[in-house]
Image (tube, rainbow, N blue to C red):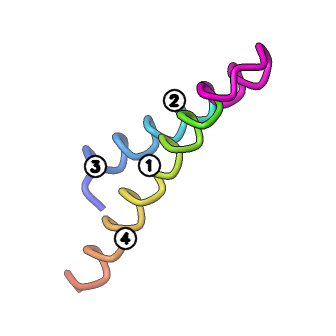
Amino acid sequence: MSGKEKSRAKAEQAKGKLKETAGRAVGNERMTAEGRAEMAKGDARQAKEKVKDVFKR
């Protein structure tokens, strides 16, 4: 996995987790859902990079 894409995926996951936690803390369902979506986006990006790594070998 390229370093840039790996860090981008981790950042999206962390940002999503933070947003989800903040949304739950204040009772904002929209923010919670947006946080989950960002975490899923980061997970998808990470999975894509792992697949690319497998086929490089």
Q: Residue at x 46, y 43 (%)?
A: 10
Q: Which mark is residue 42?
A: 1
Q: Nearer the viewer, residue 17 or 24?
A: 24
Q: Which mark is residue 15?
A: 2
User: Distance from label 3 to label 2 (Cα)?
Assistant: 15 Å
Under mark 3, the amino acid is Glu
Where in the figure is residue 37, as x and y percent of width and height?
51, 44
Q: Quadrant of the N terminus?
A: bottom left
Q: Which mark is residue 50?
A: 4
Observer-side mark, 4 or 2, equals 2
Q: Nearer the viewer, residue 16 or 56?
A: 16
The secondary element bearing badge 2 is classed as: helix
Q: Which mark is residue 19?
A: none
The secondary element bearing badge 1 is classed as: helix
Query: In the image, is residue 30 part of the stretch drawn in magenta?
Result: yes
Q: Nearer the viewer, residue 6 or 40?
A: 40
Q: Quadrant of residue 29?
A: top right
Neighbour class for label 4 at 10 Å: few (<14), some, many (≥20)? some
Under mark 2, the amino acid is Lys
Mark 4 or 1, nearer chain start: 1
Q: Which mark is residue 5?
A: 3
Under mark 4, the amino acid is Lys
Which residues, given as a range, are shown in magenta? 18-31
Query: In the image, is residue 51 part of the stretch drawn in magenta?
Result: no
Judge left or right: residue 57 versus residue 44: left
Q: Are marks 2 and 1 in contact (CB under 8 Å)?
A: yes
User: Distance from label 2 to label 1 (Cα)?
Assistant: 9 Å
